[in-house]
Amino acid sequence: MNHREIVAREGWIFIAFFAMLSALLYLGTGWAGVLPGLVLTLFCIFFFRNPERHFSASMGMVVAPADGRVMDINTVFEDKYVHDNTVQIRIFLSIFNVHINRNPIEGQVELVKRVSGIFLPAYKNEASEKNVRNYLGIASEWGKVLVVQITGIVARRLVCWVQVGDYMATGDRFGLIRFGSSTEVYLPKEATIMVQVGQKVKGGETIIARLYK
């Protein structure tokens, strides 16, 4: 499956439910009672939108794995996959952002690991280690890169469409997070960072860093 639908298939059940609710409200109350169901239907279509993104840059460029705002850029030791000092970039997604996750750099998937946890607000620093999350390790030509999908206080489900052994191009869709969350990327310590805290980014399109061999 290539997951190129204009609305992600994970959203169809919500859209169908609220559309049916709207129809029932119309039959029971007429147009006066339809508005809540209609608003929720339209919001689900908006939330699960899956736009095309176009990446065009030189080799070694890293793109944002998600839409949102850069919360933090830190130097940290990453012990789940890279096992070295890395540059961590944290991106916060509001409920109004596109929630499709995209591969930041071309490479082969070496790790897919879901970890259970709680549901703190995604903008809190502790969410990185305490919330439900999914680790995606990518072996690229320029070094190991780790992407982490993290739930939030509203987001309660992570979806990952790839598995170990898959090869992904830069910008390929690999999953989504439902209803508000954060996504982190851990890059080799030699990376040149091309974004700053507070900057808004687009997944699969905004260049956030450059890696070197």
Image: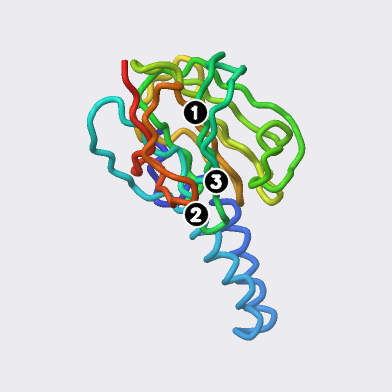
Which structural element holds mark 2? loop
Q: Amino acid at mark 3?
A: Met
Which of the marked residues, 1 or 3, is nearer the chain's N terminus? 3
Question: Which quadrant holds the N terminus?
Answer: top left
Q: Position of residue 24 (x, y in %)?
A: 66, 72
Q: Marks 3 and 1: in contact by CB < 8 Å?
A: no
- The correct choice, above or below, for 203 with respect to 103 in the image is below
Tell me the residue at 44%/21% (across/down). 188
Q: Position of residue 152 (x, y in %)?
A: 67, 46
Q: Marks 1 and 2: in contact by CB < 8 Å?
A: no
Which of the marked residues, 2 or 3, is nearer the chain's N terminus? 3
Please name whichever residue, 33 or 52, is drawn nearer the observer in this view of the structure: 52
Q: Which residue is mark 2?
A: 97
Relative side of 101 to 169, left or right: right
Q: Quadrant of residue 120?
A: top right
Q: Which residue is mark 1?
A: 87
Q: Distance of mark 2 from mark 1, alpha carbons?
A: 24 Å
Q: Amino acid at mark 1?
A: Val
Q: Exactly how many numbered labels are in the figure? A: 3
Q: Distance of mark 1 from mark 3, alpha carbons?
A: 13 Å
> Dot 3, how many residues are within 10 Å of its Cα: few (below 14), some (14-19), or many (20+)?
many
Which structural element holds mark 3? strand
Relative side of 159 to 120, left or right: left
Q: Quadrant of residue 37?
A: bottom right
The label number, if any, that marks residue 67 in the structure image: none
Q: Amino acid at mark 2?
A: Asn
- The correct choice, above or below, for 117 with respect to 201 in the image is above
Q: Which residue is mark 3?
A: 71
Please name whichever residue, 107 or 197, is drawn nearer the observer in this view of the structure: 197
